Amino acid sequence: MSAGAATCEVAGERLALLPQRAAWWAREATLFVADFHLGKAASFRRAGIPLPPGTTADNLARLDAAMAGRRVARLAFLGDFLHSAEGRAPATLEAFARWRAGRPDLAITLVRGNHDDRAGDPPGEWDIACVDPGEALGPFALVHEPAPVRGRYALAGHVHPAVRLTEAGGQSLRLPCFWFGRAVGVLPSFGAFTGSALVRPRAGDRVFVVAGEEVLDVGA
């Protein structure tokens, strides 16, 4: 396991939870990523909101860091790969096209999320298999919006989960997290400028926060 990662047993399988906000299933050489939101900054800039350029390059660099040192055969996006139709700026599309061209043997699956429904499927030449929520992969069901799937453990995104940790003196930190319940696991949002939502884990859930370059098990 790489430095800074944590492990979690889910549906009888071991997942490595990476500080890049992705989950690695070594037995099946699969990397799970939720809420990539490609083109979000470009979409906001088109609307007149002055977000800085370079977020696509940063996201791709972090994706490379998550894949580094691992024989990744499959990359599974758990919805909201593209942010919007307005975010399909030429520079954004060209950056991902170059990244994809450098990894022709990598199988990529996209589970369509609510943003993908509006943005449309990625360009066909990117060779991304686009599927509807509920796609089976071993003991897992790949979904976007968190909801149980009969007979399988659901892996989801959508809510951009975070928790607030408070110390004895009253100071607190809001941190993105991996959140594993009895039937559904939710990954943190991978993309930049995607925000987060505080979640309320139930008794028995497991929560792992992303704190800089470390993923820490904080229980429930």
Image (tube, helix red, strand yellow):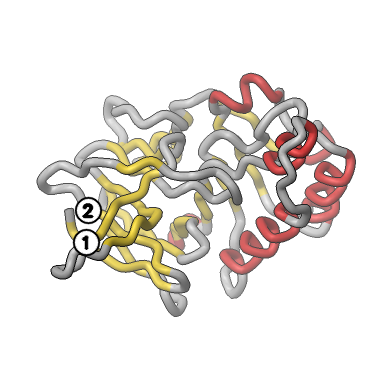
The Cα–Cα distance between marks 2 and 1, rounded to whole angstroms, is: 17 Å
Quadrant in which residue 114 is drawn = top right
Does residue 19 appear left or right of residue 111 in this picture?
A: left
Residue at 18 percent across and 48 percent down: it is 205
Whole-percent x and y of residue 127? 76, 39
SS for dot 2: strand
Q: Quadrant of residue 83?
A: top right
Residue at 31% over, 34% down: 152
Quarter of the image containing the N terminus? bottom left
Q: Quadrant of residue 14?
A: bottom left
Q: Amino acid at mark 1?
A: Thr
Q: Give the labeled residue for mark 2.
A: 206
Q: Which residue is mark 1?
A: 166
Figure check: 12 above or below 170 = above
Query: Which label sits in the foreground, 2 or 1?
Result: 1
- The location of residue 25, given as percent across then percent down, is 44, 57
Q: Position of residue 119 (x, y in %)?
A: 70, 25
Most distant residue in the bottom direction = 3
Name the residue rendered at 20%, 44% in the picture. Answer: 201
